Amino acid sequence: MKKLSLFVAVALAVFTFTAGAAFSADTLSEIQKRGKLRVGMEPGYMPFELTNQKGEIIGFDVDMAKRMAAAMKVELELVSTAWDGIIPALLTGKFDIIMSGMTLTQERNLSVNFADPYILIGQSILIKKEHADAVKSYTDLNDAKYTVASKLGTTGEQATKRLIGNAKYISYETEQEGVMELVNGKIDAFIYDLPFNAIAVSQKGQGKIVHLAEPFTKEPLAWAIRKGDVDFLNWLNNFMSQIKYDGVYDKIYQKWFQDDAWLKEIQ
């Protein structure tokens, strides 16, 4: 009898845990019940997410999130989160999805699931103007006489350590800090994502830095969600297919990557 009771107790515990896990993985239902889609992002990565003069978060990912919330018929809440804690914040339920220019990597995929990539980018290089004749690619920087930098915890940092390992390396908390240190002559090169670097050189270059615009890596960006949530993953992939079919994606892409009217909002 004690053995039977123990068996029943264990079975009930397993059932309760499994049911709880299944419920917690049903993000779509939670969003519908809450009436709000919560999106985690770090607003410092132009043109994907940034803060305008009014203190509002704007950008490519923001417009995509707005369209997503509208398709769900719910409100949108943007949750500003530091990059180095953005995956832990997702896993502890502080928001439903990461939409923050995140590169899909095998390491990150161990902790989160990724929807299908929505854009392909790569790492490019900003260098001091005086190095323009000597440095034509990342291989030229792979020398102990150079000090190169990227943002902490990013694929830019990983690529720099992997491919430019002979140079002295410095990491910065924000990409803006890295660019300003380059402009001020504190470092020789800054390695970061091509879209950001292209904008940074026109905004802050001041004739002091040069952009080597040919990316030396290929990196797919994708939205991240908690593991085990197959329904949400399916919805996201179908959403992406639909907005590409109906031209919405192209309009958002043109606004943020081909036009520059939005720059007036941050200058």
Image: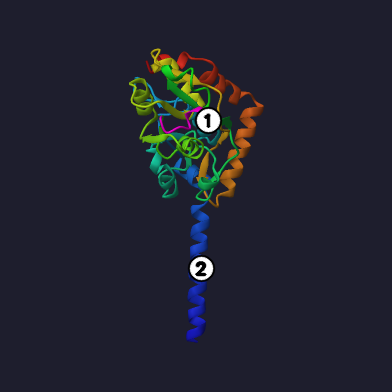
The percent position of residue 255, horizontal first and vertical second, equals 53, 19
Residue matched to label 1: 139
Identify the residue at horizontal 66%, vertical 28% (top origin). Answer: 245
- Dots 2, 1 in contact, CB < 8 A: no
Magenta span contains residue 140:
yes
Above or below, 248 against 94 in this view is above
Residue drawn at point x = 56 percent, y = 45 percent: 232
Look at the image and tell me whether residue 47 can be seen. Answer: no
In the picture, residue 83 is in which quadrant?
top left
Q: Of all residues shown, which one is farthest toward the bottom?
A: 1
Residue 136 in the image: state x and y as whole percent.
Answer: 52, 22
Which type of secondary structure does the marked residue at label 2 adopt? helix
From this view, report whether residue 261 is shown above or below residue 195: above
Give neighbour class at mark 2: few <14, some 14-19, many 20+ (Cα, 10 Å): few
State the image coordinates of residue 214 (x, y, percent, origin top left): 56, 24
Marks 2 and 1 sit apart, C-alpha to C-alpha, by 55 Å
Q: Nearer the viewer, mark 2 or mark 1?
A: 1
Give residue 28's mark. Answer: none
- First in sequence: mark 2 vs mark 1: 2
Secondary element at tag 1: helix
Task: Check the picture and name the quadrant holding the C terminus.
Answer: top left
Q: Which residue occupies the foreground of this view, 167 or 181?
A: 167
Q: Which residues are magenta?
A: 139-145
Residue tagged 2: 14
Q: Amino acid at mark 2?
A: Val
